[in-house]
Each structure stands twice: as C-alpha cells, then as structure tokens.
Image: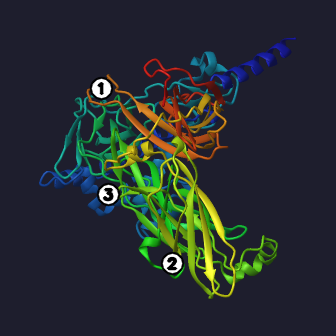
Amino acid sequence: MLTTNSAVRTSLWIIFLCSSGVCARRQRADADESWSESVSRARCASRCLSLHSVAALSILQSRLQNNGSLGWCHNHKQCAKCLEPCRDSWEMKGKGNCRELCERVFPRKHWECVTSCEFLHSVLMVKQGSCPPPQRASGFAAACVESCDHDKECSAQKKCCSNSCGHTCQTPSDIYKGAPLKPRKELAFEEVSSGQLEVHWSSRFNISAEPVVYVLQRRWNFGIQPSEDTATSWQVAAQTTEQRARLSDIRPGRWYQFRVAAVNLHGTRGFTTPSRHFHSSTDPSNPPAPTELRVANMSFGPGSTVGARIEWSMPPDLDVPIHHYKVSWSWTAVGHSSASSLTKRRKTVRKSQVELDSMRTNRSYSVEVQAVSYWGQTQFKGPRAVLHFTTQQSTETRTRHRGFFSTSAPRSPAGDVLDVGTPFYQDGQLRVHVYWQRSVDPLVEFYRIQWGPEYCGHDQTSPVEETSTKESFISLQGLLFSCKYKVLLQPVSKTSHPLAESTSFHTPPCTTIQAKSPTPVNCPRETGEANKVLVKATNLIASFEVLGGNVTAIFSWDISMTSSHQQLTGYQVTWAEVISTNRNYNVKLPRTLISQSQILPPDGNVLVVSGLRPASLYRLEVQAITTEGEGPTTRRTFQTPGYQSTLLHRSRLRKHPEQPITDRH
C-alpha cells in the first residue's frame, strides 16, 4: 500500500510541477533567451578586455577611441581575435564547432578565438550563481523527478540543480557574486542635428576588478501614442564600455523605450527598469514607391474576359506602417497610343496585391500603385509605381485551351465589346467615356452610337442622342444625374451587316459628385418634390476572429425595401478606426478618424475586413444605392476584441455612449 501511495504521490508531483511551470522545457520564453544571449556576449567581451587590459590602458591613457576600450580592442590584433566570437553575428552551433568556426576567420594562430568561443558556449549553458546543497532543497525543488537537464531549460535566473533524488529548477546562491552594480535607472536622451540620438546613463560606484561592458536594449511601437502592449521584444541597440551610446537608426513615427545592464566577466545584476518613452521630433517621411511591381498571374475566361493578379513589394522597415494602397488602372486598344482613349478605374487594398477583373483581351493596360500611411490625422502618400502590360494571348496559350475556346459562345464577326468608364464631372457637365475594341472586319467604315436614359430619379427625362466616329472610343456629355443609361454601338459597313452591341450604366446623384468634387458643382434645381429614397440597411451584425494579433471582421446586414419601384444597385460601405486622445501622456493627440470606403454589388450584403487592430474602436456605415439616388446611412460603432480573444466573437453592433446610432438621409 505504501508503494502504491508513493507512486501516486510521485505522479501527482510530476503533474503538478509540469502544470506549475517547473517543466521548463515547454515554458522557455523568447525574452529570457534574448536576455541571456546579450548578457553572455557582453561577459565574453569583458573577458577579452580583462585579458588585454594592460595593453589597453597604456594606449587609452594617451588617446580614447569611439566606444572606449572596445574600440581599441577591435583594432588590436590579438584582442580582436578574442572578441570575434562575442559579436552578435557569431552563430554558436555547439562547442565542437569552435575550432572549425575560428579557422574560417583566422586560418593561423586562432587559439584566442577558440578559447573565447568555448567561454561563450559555457556561459550560455551555465547561468550565474551556484547550486544550493542538495539537502537544502524543499517543496517543489525536492521532488524526485528529472524536470531539467540544463540551466537554459529553467525560467528566469533559476538553475538546473541536483536534490540527491533528481534534478529540478532551483534558485541559486551567490548569484551576484563579483557582478557590477546596476546603473541608475534614469536615462537621458539628446537628439543631435544629424538626426542621431545620444542615450546617457550614470553608474553607481563599482569595485569590479574586471572591465564593465554596458548592454543597451530598446523596444518600440508604432502609433500616435506610446504602448507597451504592442511594443516589439527587447533588442540590443549598443554594446559599449562608456556610459553613453549614439544611435543612428532612430526612426520617426515610433515610440522607444530603453534599458541598460552593467556586465563583467562574472555576470550582471540585470537591466534597469524601462525608461520613459522617447519620440523623435522629426516628422515621418512619406512611404517609398512600391518595388517589384509585376503580373503574378493572368487568366483568360470565356469570350474576351481576362483576370490578373498584380503583386508588389515594400521595405519592411518604414517610419510609419502602410495603412493601405491606392490602385488605379487604365487601358488603350493594342496599337493605339491616344491618351484620350484611356479609362481609369480605382481600388483600395490593404495587402501588397490586387485582383483585377473585367479586363479584356488585346489591350494595353497601365497599373499605378501608391502607398498611403497615416500619422494621427496626417496622411502620407508615396510616389506611384507604374506597370505596363498587354492582355494579348499567345499562340501557345490558345492551342493549350483550344477546346475551351471552341465551346465558348460564338461572337459576331466584328467582335466589338463595349466598356464604360466611371462618370465624372468636368466643365459643368456630367460625362463618361465609352470604349470598344476596333472591329477586325476591314470593311467597317465607322461606328454609330446611340444613348439615352432608360429611367431617372426625380422624373427627369432626356431624348435619345446619336453620333458617329471612326475611333474606338467616345465621350458622352451632358448626362443627367441619378439615371440608368443604355448605349447602342452599331458598326457600319457597305457590304456586310455587323451585329450591334449594347450595354448599360448608372450615373451618380448630383450630391455625390458635389461632395467629392474639389471645385463647386451646381446641382440642377428639381421641380416638384423629389422622390425620397427609402431603401436602407438594417440589423448590422459583426463577427470577429483574432489570429496572431490581427482582427478579421465579418460584417453583414439586411435591407429594408419599402418601395418596390426603387431598384437597388449596390451598397457604399465605409469603416473607420476612431482614435481618442490618451490623457496619460503630455502629448496633444486630437481625436482622429481614418476611414476606407468600398462599393459592393446589390447582392453583396457581407463584407470581410482583415487587419483591424485588437481592442480598438471602429465605426461602420452602410448606405444603399438605388436607381433614384442614395438611401439613408446606417451607422454603428463597435469595439474589436482584445489579444486574449481567440474564439469567434459574434455580436449585434450596439450604440456607443459617445456616438449615438443615427440614420442620415
């Protein structure tokens, strides 16, 4: 019975120890490894300075170099060999590799390098301090289990020590023996005219017999206010024997924190508490132009339709992260370079790629991509990158898809395909460009075009107009607002009778053009009472998913149709991040609203938005677009879940205390 109870107790110990974090193989933190490695390399450097201290002092008495005695050591033949494994660029792959690694750098007389490499390996494996006597182990430390093999498997400063029955992670004794005192926690910052930053600190009186090396670390976060929750992990910024460091890679648009540790051959007493946040007084720069702009994939569909995926690259280290990209594309018929035949369409994307659809074969396309960043309410736009490509299909591709093309619907001999650009307002008139592929029939002399409104809002009317041209494009002028137009294209030939092509398009309401136009727009005065658009979005629903610190939102809504004659043509959806002032910092931070808008088709009452910030306030606006104009705008304000949320979160958007739910007509 005793044996059974003993086994049960042992099993319970093992389960409890593992669940409590004593099984450190599964619980090692990246921060502990980074801390241990940076301190170990500084101990390695202190050892080299200690070995060559006599030669260093004789030189330094006459002339100090940058970075103190470390600067001297880098230029001293023997000391530099000793210092080589202490560099951050030196990769440790095991003690047996030291001689091989040193021979690559120093083919002859590399013993200084080898001994330094072996010392670094030992301090990486063995932590500071001494294991306590086994008989003093108590509690968890006295459990008869093999919970560790090496010091690095134990968290924080604990060591893997024997308790005469097994090995557990225990608190060592004499952990700070011979280690220098911590520097004072107050750090001073000074921006120099060259854009560099000098960080100063002061040390308490140290009686260390070995040279002291200071390790300066930093972390930072993007944003208009400091945040430790979204900051990077601690990274080594400098290693020096002086009580200051000059940093040349400080970027505007970031909030920095620093900490410093004093290290010698025996170890360290740890880093100082994180400093106050530092923010450069220099304004962030505009993002650069995207690079490596390319067509990643092109697919040919039925008829003359073409789809393409455009991709590009951006440098990872920018002053301010990219908020979104503006993409515009235009085309001309192959063989035509007339600028007036260009049509331009636009998209806004968050990722470094975009899908372009509804393109046509045998056209020359021009794509422009521009990066946009935000710093508070200030928008930063970078230069545009331009890509030119054609959608001509090669003979090889046609042969490979011969069966596909043979089963597609037959087209007219002329092969004319109508394409309508985006209506725009110019010289006091609403206009639109219409384009088509020039007929392959050599007998076609010109094109006859007819256009007129099928129906309009506010009971407007206009007669059918007609014109002719020999070009493959035309500009229609004097259009009415809030109308659905039909366009008919008829190729004219003396001997043949090519089939006509037709298409339809909608013109926007005058208020939409008026709101977006940089110049005043005089909307026509309407006679009688306008038909009020009653179609609106209702029951806004949001679902959230948090993965890796990024939030993806799935928005959906219903539509209220109170008038059967008002035809729904789409939705305009706008989402915006609302950033409020943080009163805990002495920085004037205005309330800001960074928004994006997208037009969805009438059946698109679901929108997926990725890349939202956790635990942030957002506003959603949905407005129905009909043939008679725009309906009321439904607004909702919501909070995204925080980092702790890992399950799908679904909730009906509720009224925010400071932003009442309103419908705007």
Quick check: marks 3 and 2 in contact, CB under 8 Å? no
Quick check: marks 2 and 1 in contact, CB under 8 Å? no
Q: Residue at x 43, y 31 (%)?
A: 578
Kind of residue at disc 2:
Glu
Asked which secondary structure carries label 3, the reply is helix
User: Can see residue 44?
Assistant: no
Q: Residues within 10 Å of mark 2 (few under 14, many from 20)?
A: few
Spot occupied by residue 343 in the image (x, y as percentages of width and height): 49, 65
Direction from residue 197 to residue 342 in the image, left or right: right
Q: Residue at x 61, y 41 (%)?
A: 608
Q: Nearer the viewer, mark 2 or mark 1?
A: 2
Direction from residue 442 to residue 377 in the image, left or right: left
Residue 471 numbered tag: 2
Spot occupied by residue 496 in the image (x, y as percentages of width and height): 69, 84
Residue 585 numbered tag: 1
Q: Residue at x 19, y 54 (%)?
A: 65
